[in-house]
Amino acid sequence: MSGINGKQLFSKILVGIDGSAIALRAADSAISIAKQLNISNIIAVHVLPQDIRYDYLTDRVDPDIPSPVKGAIELASLEAQEWFNKIKEKQTSDVDKKINMQTEVLVGTKSIANEILTYAANNDVDLIVVGTKGQSAFKKALLGSVASSVLTHATCPVMLVK
């Protein structure tokens, strides 16, 4: 799909992953779009909630963070890596379409939506793909709070997947 002046409309897609079935469908949709539009860059991002940090100021597994918190971050990161591996397996099933799949686990310092939006802005993302509802215990009637916030505040197009 060409944009203004023949320039490709999208060149980098970010997909938010939380392990939910809807998020994995969002990843499938992002891969499908990338293949159809010959987009070579997808970034799959999982944001660990800020409360996992217990208000520590670093976004890395740091030696000053107590072991239980470090362990929780490492376990959550390992779980996210399993999700990323599932997505990469699907993505590599079509050898004709080469897609560079980058994965990131972010330890939130703000809301999950804000982390996704900041990451997208800092990494020149052209399209954000998220599921309409994730794994949070509290759900809005029709649209999850992360999806709603991303849709409301994004500076690039957003695709919501049911």
Image (cartoon, grey):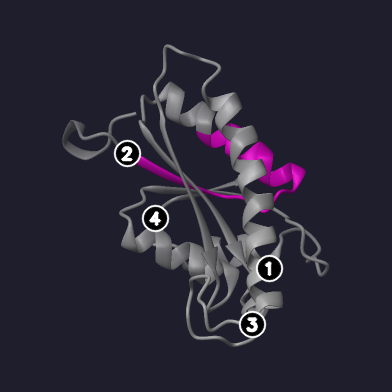
Question: Which residue is identified by label 1?
Answer: 71
Q: Nearer the viewer, mark 1 or mark 4?
A: 1
Ranked by sequence position, the earlier of labels 2 and 1 is: 2
User: Based on the displayed image, in which of its 4 quarters is residue 162 positioned?
Assistant: top right
Question: Which residue is identified by label 4?
Answer: 156
Rendered view: 128 above or below 137: above
| Quarter placement of the N terminus | top left
State how far apart marks 2 and 1 are (Cα): 36 Å
Which structural element holds mark 2?
A: loop
Residue 12 magenta-highlighted:
yes
> Percent x, y for residue 98?
39, 22
State how far apart marks 4 and 3 are (Cα): 38 Å
Identity of the residue drawn at 81% across and 70% down = 138
Asked whether disc 1 touches disc 3, contact meaning CB atoms under 8 Å apart, the reply is: no
Q: Which mark, residue 11?
A: 2
Magenta region:
10-30
Ranked by sequence position, the earlier of labels 2 and 4 is: 2
Q: Amino acid at mark 3?
A: Pro
Identity of the residue drawn at 51% across and 71% down = 114
Q: Which mark, residue 66?
A: 3
Bin the neighbour count of mark 3 within 10 Å (Cα to Cα): few under 14, some 14-19, many 20 and up. Answer: few
Which structural element holds mark 4?
A: loop
Asked whether disc 2 touches disc 4, contact meaning CB atoms under 8 Å apart, the reply is: no
User: Based on the displayed image, in which of its 4 quarters is residue 110 positioned?
Assistant: bottom right
Ranked by sequence position, the earlier of labels 3 and 2 is: 2
Q: Amino acid at mark 2?
A: Ser
Residue 96 magenta-highlighted:
no
